[in-house]
């Protein structure tokens, strides 16, 4: 079964609002990444947070990681219509393998 | 062209046929991955490779074969295609993985239909 599950599955907001997506995972991890996928396209890396980090920022993105709860959140502030996409978390499990396991994704729609 | 490219972009094949999806990267990244993406399942890892001649099973390896004789190429073969293998397939590469993971770069995907 997949390591990560995103919540919610779908999210609709207005431009200018903040969007928060959550990712829960099942086993220990070395690090966690967030990716974005525009419809029909390949995935693009957004941000990586290591297991010893709690928060990371990149532009309008803020990622938090709570290893005790096995969860991460991605916050997009002041969203734009161009942020409309699917967002996935991906984990590098802490099992001495080189796997990169993706979750099921959150589909974000930002209305102008 | 620099980057990671997949071919073909679209493929229709018949049940029982063998089909190979190609993946080529120009960065000499050590790690390469194959995923399939199906509605409701996100991306599921099929196989991955840490270097030439080193491959490992992912979450859903059954029915697939990979090889990696050269660092830059990581072909995925469906030995006898089934309708359940109809999907969009993504290849990715990264400089590091696991504990020291770095960002992965994805190809544009191959949409495979098995009829």
Image (tube, rainbow, N blue to C red):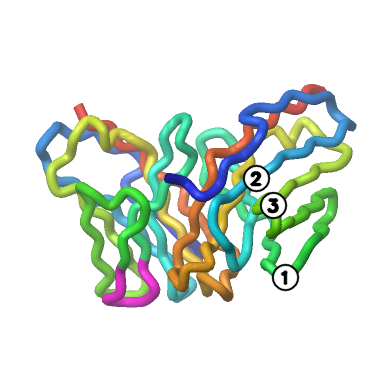
Q: Quadrant of residue B101?
A: bottom right
- Contact (CB < 8 A) between labels 1 and 2? no
Residue carrying label 3: A69
Residue B3's disc number: none
Residue A61 vertical placement versus A87 (above, below):
below
In the picture shown, does residue B15 fall above or below B46?
above
Q: Residue at x 79, y 25 (%)?
A: A13
Measured in 3D between alpha carbons, the distance from the residue under mark 1 to the one under mark 2, in whole angstroms, is 17 Å
Q: Which mark is residue A23?
A: 2
Q: Give the distance between the C-alpha atoms of the residues marked 3 and 1, in whole angstroms.
A: 14 Å
Is B51 magenta? The answer is yes
Q: Is residue B49 visible?
A: yes
Q: Are marks 3 and 1 in contact (CB under 8 Å)?
A: no
**Closer to the camera in the image, A16 or B84:** B84
Instruction: Give the labeled residue for mark 1.
Output: A52
Check the picture and name the quadrant holding the C terminus of chain B.
Answer: top left
Chain to which the residue tagged by mark 2 belongs:
A
**Callout in the foreground (3, 1):** 3
Residue A74 pos. (x, y %)? 74, 46
How many marks the image carries: the answer is 3
The earlier-in-sequence mark between 2 and 3 is: 2
Q: Which chain contains the residue that carries disc 1?
A: A
How many angstroms separate mark 2 from mark 3 (CA)? 11 Å
Q: Is residue B44 left or right of residue A27?
A: left
Q: Residue at x 73, y 37 (%)?
A: A83
Using the rendered image, report if marks 2 and 3 lie on a common chain.
yes
Q: Is residue B23 above or below residue B90?
A: below
Residue range corresponding to the magenta coloring: B49-55
Q: Nearer the viewer, mark 2 or mark 3?
A: 3
């Amino acid at each position: 079964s997949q390591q990560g599950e995103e919540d919610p599955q779908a999210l609709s907001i207005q431009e200018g609002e903040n969007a928060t997506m959550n990712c829960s995972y099942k086993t220990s991890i070395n690090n966690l990444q967030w990716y974005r996928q525009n419809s029909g396209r390949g995935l693009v890396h957004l941000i990586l947070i290591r297991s010893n980090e709690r928060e990371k920022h990149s532009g309008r993105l803020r990622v938090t990681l709570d290893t005790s709860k096995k969860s991460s959140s991605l916050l997009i502030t002041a969203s734009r219509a161009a942020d409309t996409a699917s967002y996935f978390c991906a984990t590098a499990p802490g099992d001495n393998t080189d796997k990169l396991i993706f979750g099921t994704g959150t589909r974000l729609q930002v209305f102008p | 062209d620099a980057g990671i490219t997949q071919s073909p972009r679209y493929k229709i094949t018949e049940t029982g046929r063998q089909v190979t999806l190609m993946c080529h990267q120009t960065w000499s990244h050590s790690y390469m991955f194959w995923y399939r993406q199906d509605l409701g399942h996100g991306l599921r890892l099929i196989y991955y490779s840490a270097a030439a001649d080193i491959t490992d099973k992912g979450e859903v390896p059954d029915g697939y074969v990979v090889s990696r004789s050269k660092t830059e190429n990581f072909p995925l073969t469906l030995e006898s295609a089934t309708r359940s293998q109809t999907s969009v397939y993504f290849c990715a590469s990264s400089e590091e993985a696991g504990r020291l993971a770095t960002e992965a770069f994805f190809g544009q995907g191959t949409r495979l239909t098995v009829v």
